[in-house]
């Protein structure tokens, strides 16, 4: 005891894995005792599982302390490009927890869940009206599943039309990794469209690919606005080209926050699109999910939508399977709890508010671009949409990379932007402020970025190699983690 | 509008700093005819909390919650009591409103939760590794079939050993079709994997040793799918499998009309580099302190693009957090006890229902769910039960699959028995 020196943690509490806190006989629930009875499992009952034995106060303290080691949008600015980390209204959470939503079973008789079906029908209508794409399925579980469902619709449509030989999908090099991964999952062959000097789909090369592959083309998957932060200004021509050979235009809606209520995707030639309800429509990211990725398609493609889909017949709502459905992509009915949250958000904002969402998001990103463009390399000229793309080209000359800038931001209390993506530029920094950040908060970020740039410019940037220093953990050894994977606490002991 | 952070003055001065006069100037890449200057028509305008809450409550009121009377549905989605601590903790901003933990120095909270989630899943299933979660049991099973096809690359199909949840099979079919793979009943040399549901869709508990033998005979991977993870507190761990996947929403997550649920995915360590989804691993930081990061990323879409093991990106992070908290509260003692209570309730019901004239109980063994058969269509029986405010089981033709839990009271079972007896006789 004499040699004991307490750790100077202040409020930065540590907590050990629960298995290390386990004490024989502790339990965090009180359950009634079970009288001896004859088991009907046809086997011996399980002996040891190996779970920790802890009581409720321990569990609460452990998870509260863990939570203190997380950054969150509630606590600070989170400008992750193409991730749309906006404020998550608590009304959404409250509504999703109403027993009439949270405590209903997917196999209940439809007469007992009319309100849930009506809600889904309303959400379908909102998404259809906002986009002008009238066929909507809420089934997909997340953005990547929305992409999958959308590409399955396209595949099915071609097959039904006797065009099953169409295997080529054109995807820009700036696309999210999920796009090529999804197309590959569907059995499509991917042809990459290079970006041009403006960060847009290279129209000449796109034309060339369209001519070369002609009626072997199933479609194109384009994110618009794209991940360079640009609206594809040739989008009408791109859509016309893909349509001219009988292909479909799939729009990745990851960046829909820039144009929601400002541009109807159907008007610019989009045939199929997915939404990320956890981006544009404010459902929380939850440290990785759950998301929700509904899709909207042109009316003539609605018969190919994944099932189920909610229909209204008279004054009754019911689940229906579209006539030539591409099948089921997820169990039961999709991420219903996220549907509740998203509709709550849409009703709160209304058509007028959603338009303002897009406008403010675009103003804020352009404001950041205007303030930083003389201090960081801007790879593509002109204004941006709801996110702006910078690179580390200037700082690289002094030996500091995007990685160091990101870690310095952490030290200064800001979550880094999306880094090293898109892949079309070296050392990408993709910054998306969203509409829910005050000007003061944005100015603080700008000032920090300017400070970082100045320190590097004046040769005081070496310290950033060690950053962050004030976080629960310093830089972590990724190589070690991958080389000898330790993936469970059993392996750790 | 309460969620917008800029004031009218901010907008004006920011536009001035940018050097444009109107926000529409920033949309100069959009052809003017396609740029909407006014809100889209046909949709309501913004509303306050009071109004929105009313609308949502109206929807909610038209639904009959499971807790509002006797309730016996399971079939892949199980109602259990969720301790109050769970919802309190997952609503903490730091868990609720954080992103995927790509910056580990400021995401140790989420990463440590994932690491413990993986650990708990591995212990329950008897597998060495587990990922950070999948969307649900159905997609998790579909991904496991694709993984088996990747590992056994010469083989074309997947076989099923017993009755698998039809919803899961529908999803599997969608995914297998893309690989021109079939889901067949026959276990032969063409099978990359054999799927066995444990317990099966009708509640029967298969003999896993027998399945293992059949898999070895044809050189197929053994895929066990568990739709009620609580069962693993009473049943033997399916440790002889190669891959164990399934649904874990029973603990911490709840019904949610079938989503969000919580898929889990575990396998033998030798297959870890073929696994879909995110994986968290332990490492050390610059000071040598234990910490966690997302690892083995070379399998994933953001690195491998079209060569990735799966396109999955977002998963069910917060649901996995809820599961981890609920399971931690239960612990070794509570988990096994809760499983035993669930089985006991089902056994009680089994005794009572098997005495009813016109009811035939089909199971010899079960966990918390079994199947009864009538001489008439079960949907008809269910409709009559509903008239008495009883939500019956899941119906397939003349069969009804009934689930029981710690929330099922003796009165509920007696009431069900009484009404069934009236309906059938």
Image (spheres, rainbow, N blue to C red):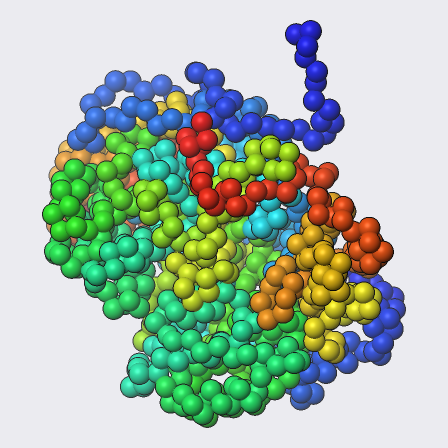
- Image quarter where the C terminus of chain A lies is top left
Does B45 appear above or below B390? below
Between residue A380 and residue A45, name the one nearer to us: A380
Between residue B164 and residue A449, name the one nearer to us: A449
> Which residue is pictured at 45% across the width and 69% down the height?
A180
Task: Report which quarter residue B28 is drawn in.
Answer: bottom right
Q: Locate residue B113 relative to residue B141 in the image: left or right.
A: right
Does B36 appear above or below B86? below
Determine if residue B262 is in view.
no
| Outermost top residue | A2
> Which residue is pictured at 51% across the width and 22% down the height?
A21
Q: Position of residue A464 (x, y in %)?
A: 74, 48
Q: Position of residue A278 (x, y in %)?
A: 57, 58
Task: Report which quarter residue B54 is drawn in.
Answer: bottom right
Q: Locate residue B148 relative to residue A13 in the image: left or right.
A: left
Q: Position of residue B125 (x, y in %)?
A: 32, 37
> Which residue is pictured at 39% across the width and 80% down the height?
A168
Does A36 appear above or below B318? above
Q: Position of residue A221 (x, y in %)?
A: 49, 76
> Which residue is pictured at 45% across the width and 22% down the height?
A53
Q: Locate residue A417 relative to residue A487 in the image: left or right.
A: right
- Image quarter where the N terminus of chain A lies is top right
């Amino acid at each position: 005891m004499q040699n004991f020196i307490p750790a100077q943690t202040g409020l930065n509490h540590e907590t050990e894995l629960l298995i290390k806190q386990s004490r024989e006989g502790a339990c965090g629930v009180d359950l009634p005792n079970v009288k001896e009875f004859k088991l009907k499992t046809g086997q011996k009952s399980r002996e040891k599982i190996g779970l920790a034995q802890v009581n409720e106060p321990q569990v609460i303290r452990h998870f509260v302390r863990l939570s203190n080691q997380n950054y969150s949008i509630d606590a600070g600015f989170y400008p992750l490009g193409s991730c749309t980390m906006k404020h998550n209204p608590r009304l959404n959470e409250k509504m999703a927890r109403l027993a009439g939503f949270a405590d209903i079973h997917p196999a209940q008789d439809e007469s007992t869940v009319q309100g849930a079906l009506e809600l889904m029908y309303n959400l379908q209508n909102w998404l259809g009206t906002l986009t002008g794409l009238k066929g909507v399925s809420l089934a997909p579980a997340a953005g990547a599943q929305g992409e999958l469902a959308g590409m399955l619709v396209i595949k099915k449509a071609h097959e039904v039309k006797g065009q099953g030989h169409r295997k080529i999908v054109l995807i820009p090099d700036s696309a999210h990794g999920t796009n090529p991964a999804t197309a590959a999952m569907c059995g499509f062959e991917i042809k990459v469209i290079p970006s041009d000097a403006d960060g847009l789909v290279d129209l000449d090369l796109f034309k060339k690919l369209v001519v070369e592959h002609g009626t072997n083309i199933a479609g194109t998957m384009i994110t618009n606005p794209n991940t360079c932060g640009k609206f594809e200004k040739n989008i009408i021509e791109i859509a016309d080209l893909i349509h001219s050979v009988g292909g479909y235009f799939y729009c990745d809606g990851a960046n829909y926050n820039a144009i929601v209520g400002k541009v109807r995707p159907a008007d610019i030639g989009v045939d199929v699109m997915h939404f990320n309800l956890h981006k544009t429509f404010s459902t929380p990211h939850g440290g990785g999910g759950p998301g929700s990725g509904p899709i909207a398609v042109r009316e003539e493609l609605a018969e190919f939508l994944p099932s189920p889909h909610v229909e209204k017949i008279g004054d009754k709502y019911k689940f229906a399977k579209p006539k030539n459905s591409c099948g089921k992509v997820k169990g039961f009915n999709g991420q219903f709890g996220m549907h509740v949250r998203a509709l709550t958000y849409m009703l709160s904002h209304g058509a007028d508010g959603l338009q303002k969402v897009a406008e403010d998001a675009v103003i804020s990103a352009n404001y950041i671009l205007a303030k930083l463009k003389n201090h960081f390399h801007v790879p593509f000229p002109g204004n941006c949409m709801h996110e702006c793309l910078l690179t580390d080209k200037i700082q690289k000359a002094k030996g500091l990379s995007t990685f160091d800038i990101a870690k310095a931001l952490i030290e200064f209390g800001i979550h880094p932007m999306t880094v090293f993506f898109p892949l079309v530029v070296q050392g990408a920094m993709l910054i998306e402020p969203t509409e829910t950040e005050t000007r003061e908060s944005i100015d603080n970020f700008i000032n920090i970025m300017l400070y970082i740039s100045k320190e590097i410019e004046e040769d005081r940037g070496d310290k950033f190699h060690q950053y962050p220093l004030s976080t629960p953990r310093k830089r972590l050894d990724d190589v070690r983690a991958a080389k000898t994977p330790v993936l469970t606490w059993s392996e750790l002991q | 509008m309460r969620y917008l952070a800029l004031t009218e003055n901010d907008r004006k001065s920011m536009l001035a700093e940018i050097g444009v006069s109107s926000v529409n100037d920033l949309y100069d890449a959009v052809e003017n005819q396609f740029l909407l200057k006014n809100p889209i028509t046909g949709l309501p305008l913004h509303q306050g909390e009071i109004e929105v809450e009313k609308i949502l409550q109206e929807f909610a009121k038209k639904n009959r919650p499971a807790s509002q009377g006797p309730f016996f549905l399971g079939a892949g989605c199980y109602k259990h009591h969720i301790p109050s601590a769970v919802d309190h903790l997952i609503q903490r901003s730091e868990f609720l409103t954080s992103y995927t933990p790509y910056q580990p120095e400021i995401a140790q909270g989420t990463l440590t939760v994932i690491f413990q989630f993986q650990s708990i899943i591995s212990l329950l299933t008897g597998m060495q590794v587990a990922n950070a979660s999948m969307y649900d049991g159905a997609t998790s099973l579909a991904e496991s079939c694709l993984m088996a096809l990747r590992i056994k690359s010469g083989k074309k199909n997947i076989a099923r050993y017993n009755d698998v949840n039809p919803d899961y099979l529908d999803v599997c079919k969608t995914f297998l079709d893309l690989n021109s793979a079939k889901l067949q009943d026959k276990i032969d040399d063409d099978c990359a994997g054999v799927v066995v549901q444990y317990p099966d869709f009708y509640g029967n508990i298969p003999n896993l040793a027998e399945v293992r033998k059949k898999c070895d005979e044809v050189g197929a991977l053994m895929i066990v799918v568990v739709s009620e993870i609580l069962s693993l507190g009473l049943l033997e761990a399916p440790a002889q499998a190669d891959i164990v996947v399934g649904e874990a929403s029973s603990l911490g997550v709840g019904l949610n009309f079938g989503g969000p649920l919580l898929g889990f995915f575990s396998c033998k360590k030798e297959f870890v580099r073929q696994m879909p989804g995110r994986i968290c691993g332990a490492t050390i930081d610059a000071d040598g302190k234990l910490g966690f990061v997302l690892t083995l990323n070379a399998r994933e879409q953001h690195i491998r693009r079209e060569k990735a093991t799966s396109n999955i990106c977002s998963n069910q992070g917060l649901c996995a957090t809820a599961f981890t908290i609920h399971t931690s509260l239960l612990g070794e003692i509570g988990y096994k006890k809760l499983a035993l209570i669930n089985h006991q309730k089902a056994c009680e019901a089994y005794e009572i229902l098997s005495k009813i004239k016109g009811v035939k109980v089909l199971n010899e063994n079960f966990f918390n769910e079994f199947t009864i058969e009538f001489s008439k269509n079960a949907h008809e029986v269910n409709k009559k039960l509903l008239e008495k405010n009883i939500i019956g089981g899941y119906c397939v033709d003349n069969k009804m699959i009934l689930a029981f839990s710690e929330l099922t009271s003796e009165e509920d079972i007696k009431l069900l028995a009484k009404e069934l007896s009236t309906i059938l006789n």
